Image: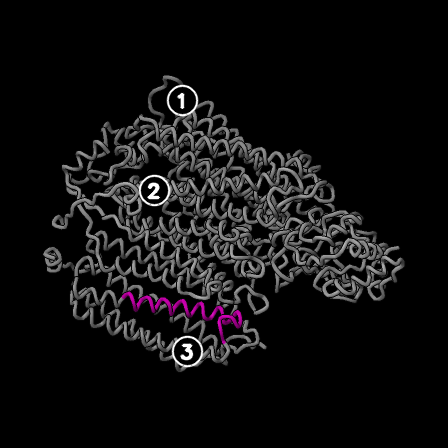
Amino acid sequence: MSDHTHAAPKRSGLWDWLTTVDHKKIGILYLLAGGIFFLFGGVEALLIRLQLLYPEQQVVGADTFNQLITMHGTTMIFLAVMPVIFGFMNAIVPLQIGARDVAFPFVNALGFWLFFFGGLLLNTSWLLGGAPNMGWTAYATLASNPKFTGLGADFYVLGLQIAGLGTLLGGINFLVTIINMRAPGMTFMRMPLFTWTSFVTSALILFAFPALTVGLVFLMFDRLFGANFFNPDAGGNVLIWEHIFWIFGHPEVYILILPAFGIISEIVSTFSKKRLFGYSSMVFATILIGFLGFMVWVHHMFTSGLGPIANTLFGIATMLIAVPTGIKIFNWLFTMWGGHIRFTTANLFAVGFIPTFTIGGMTGVMLANPAADYQYHDTYFVVAHFHYVIVGGLVFGLMGGLYYWWPKIFGKFLNETIGKWNFWTFFIGFHLTFFPQHFLGLMGMPRRVFTYLKGQDLELGNFISSIGVLGMAIGTILLFINIFVAAKSAKRAPADPWDGRTLEWAIPSPAPEYNFAQTPLVRGLDALWTEKMAGNKGMTPAEPLGSIHMPSPSFIPFVMSVGLFIAGYGFMYASTWGTYIVGIIGLVITLFCMLLRSLYDDHGYHIEPDEIEEKGVKA
Amino acid sequence: MAADHALHTALPDEPEKATLEGKNKVLGFWLFLGGETVLFGTLFATFIALRDQVNGGPTAKELFEMPIVAWATFLLLTSSLTSVFATLALHKHNLKQVQAWLVVTVLLGLGFLGLEIYEFVHYVHEGHKISSSAFGSAFYTLVGFHGGHVAFGVLWITTLIIQSFKKGLTVVTAPKFYVAGLYWHFIDVVWVFIFTVVYLMGMIGGKAVA
Amino acid sequence: MLMALALVLTGCGKENLSTLIPQGPVAEKQFFLMVLTSSIMTGVFLIVIIILTYVLIRYRQRPGQTGIPKQVEGSHKLEILWTVIPFLLLIVMAVPTVAIAFDLAKEYSNKDALQVKVTAHQFWWEFEYPDLGIVTAQDLYIPAGKKVEFTVTSADVIHAFWIPALGGKIDTNPGLTNKIWLQADKPGTYFGKCAELCGASHALMDFKVEALEPAAFDAWAKKMKAAEAAPAPTATAAAAQGQEIFRKSCMGCHAIGNEGGKLAPNLTNFAERHKVAGIRDNKKEFVAEWLTDPQQVKPGNTMPNLHLSPDQVNALVEYLSTLKVNQ
């Protein structure tokens, strides 16, 4: 193979980022794009709470409000937290399993750019006549019939379709990476929990996203080509959309939360200086949650009239998920039990996660009860529940992950003092915002209402909730200030700043291009900790120092995604412009890129041992 | 090219899995087909839910032209067999045979597509359109998605045949042939289900709907 | 603890709106489930919090503390314990869950329950009493102490029919029908809401439930039926002028009695409605405001702005204020 060596391509600046296939750089791109979309979604949330501060306000109009809630939900789920999860998976999973790269570096880049352009397309709707306004769940016929919803719904359909394709590719990439590319000795039952949860999440993506793809195709055909999937006047059925959406949508919830479980497991274990309590049952619980996640979608449809048999079966299946989730909670508690707990910012988020997520789980069990859910369904009780799970669970986990892995990803520290302020403002703000919403729901406030009338005793709860948002806003601003401060600081992070346990802490911060100069030999769970306890300074290599094969950067993923981006507009505006030509041009660009990729094989390039020494030091 | 030559002479038994890249590609593609299964599963489920909703238009029984469908089925199943021959030839490292069998596969695929287009045009003339009923929407989307997959497969395998003249059979090209073969089998299997669920069940089953 | 929680939860919200102050058997059963599940869950939460607090205080790293804590792999006993106990708790919750879910799904014939057909529209509610031959809108009249079975559907998009104080809730799906039964134990006016996002004015798609003593309900039904067959004649000149405008401009969509269109709410008893457009008090100024610019009051609704002159508006308001059945 060595005779394939080409010179390492020299690329820099923007061009480097647009063409990179390095999983660590793609990870950073995901974090960056996800962070920006998180700000968008956050501003939307602020406007929502501003509108609901007092009853019968007119801060934004009714329709704008519906656009805000739709875009807030869609953005946060598909364009903010999922990319940040993918950012961590890219940045960390290959390092945790001792791999030099992911299985498909090119496809990995393609996945990122598809997500990015899908998200961009969706957000341009704000400038092009109004964002989607039918809720992120896009129920038919409101979403399927152009009579009820304008162009915004088309942006939703096509933007999510493109972004979803990227997610699917990312999922396959990580499945293959984890199955095929683990270092010698890294058996499945030695994989760190974050890798395990990423693995199960990727599997869920693989089996859940195609359902969304099909659902969006139906919606698109109904809207653009006059099909009748959801049109009751021509034999269509509105419940088909609900089924398809939630067959995707419920696993999606676990796609989101499982990696957070993984992050929390890593943080709790590291900062207690103890191995994870009940590692095997944690793995088992993760797989079980992933599996059950596909069996419970009807609990989103208890009030749609499927009858008591379906409702109770799915309700009980839903309650069962509480068992593996409970196992996790207690395993975390007992990981800390007997440890030496350090209260770093990362660990504060992990510790804050536990009671908060427990509340989300409690209300989850309550909601699983169909007869009671008839009262909760589509009220602020549900809004409170899923924010406890997604913000109190997932976002806490992601923020903890940021503080934990920032040194590994960027080679610098986030400031701990600002970090603690970040945690406390966000934590208190969060509970202030969402705790009262449980009661608002029980007191009769439906969700997705742009206002509420005076004299229904809903004023106080809404007022507190809107004030609480300020805390979350301040916390988020502090996080961004912290990132800015870290970027300016000169202090460099060492390879292993937290006395870590897993493989990513065995290599320099940030990781060099090739990750591991020599593939490590893994000799136990918590690979690095095992070596530390054996009195070794680092990992034992599994191979002699040799030249390392690397994939070439490529601009094709970017262009390919631009092709679909153009095609998206082409199809949306086909009836306005009276032609499909733009859509076809876009598709041809994408297909042509695929052809190029097939015709020109990438032989990559090699990094020679002398370069490795040099790079290893300067990172 | 010297390197390619060296690889060519030392081609292992299963050249598609000789390198880590090859192994990744094959495993990744199997997983992709897993996702495709969910995709078609969803399309089938929807079709079954909506197949009696003809909205006053022709029913499946009145509509379907079984001889055309039978011929299409015959062509596609035969092409599945020829693609197996191509993969067998791949394992024998016989590039000429690989190319020959793939050409036959593509031709059969084109024949299938021709029949399907003819069939669709015929149905549209009968008043069975994507916009005429929920049945029409579900029918054209399911069968059309499959047809789109066949068309993509034809394009894909054609480019593989063309580039194989220049690149030959190596550990880089072998996974491509192998994976394309997997894909082709998959769409054949899907067709078997379409033939059963859409056409056979349409002809014999299906409630009598006014 | 169950009692304490029930005590905390009750008294939350407005009596004729809150799910926490149930006003009928359905809401009561649901409230029972809420209290049961939230008590068990609160217990679990307290256990988690107690362990967490203990752990965080007891095992925080002391300054200068060195050494390595014992690396515990796990404990089968403990792990089985926190698998089995939640499982048992789930069974405790599952039994009443199943029982009540089936109880609430019972269907009743018109002998056991008053039948009402509900059709949801963007953004108003139509109520038809097939056995009584009455169609009305926005204000739902029911007899107190008697089961009412609703057969619900929608004319356009999915809405959800919800009367929190009486029990919840069922989606109204276009092209499909669903059933739900509810009962108000005592007479009163209860809030009804749409709970599924249905367009711009989803938040304003409120309705009122007027539960009457059975005798009063029967009387109302009789008068209503009579009024639908032959609306009362108009008395004043202004009202007569209003009626003329109504005939010309409104009747395509609105009906009074059996006369007129069915695209918009039936206005037979309009003057007795609690609210105008479901949200504003039924006073002349608000009726006028609504007639002058419907989009301002309820964005996205299907009522066109007829560009009436102030005089015409006043005449219409006069006319509408005569539409009563109960005097």
Residue at 63%, 50% (x, y): give it: A374
| Residue type beneath disc 1 | Gln
Residue C125, position in %: x, y? 70, 57
Q: Estimate the spatial distance between the alpha carbons at disc 2 and disc 1, rounded to whole Å.
A: 33 Å
Circle 3: element type: helix
A333 displayed left or right of A371: left
B149 displayed left or right of C42: left
Circle 2: element type: helix
Which of the chains bears the disc numbered 1? Answer: C
| Residue type beneath disc 3 | Glu
Q: What residue span does the magenta drawing correspond to?
A: B128-156
**Label 3 neighbourhood size at 10 Å, few (<14), some (14-19), many (20+)?**
some
Residue marked by disc 1: C61
Residue marked by disc 2: A27
Residue A511, position in %: x, y? 27, 36
Circle 1: element type: loop
* In magenta stretch: residue B135: yes
Residue A580, position in %: x, y? 42, 65
Q: Which mark is residue C16?
A: none
Please name whichever residue, A559 or B181, is drawn nearer the observer in this view of the structure: A559
Residue at 24%, 63% (x, y): give it: B177
Residue marked by disc 3: B119
Which of the chains bears the disc numbered 2? Answer: A
Q: Estimate the spatial distance between the alpha carbons at disc 3 and disc 1, rounded to whole Å.
A: 75 Å
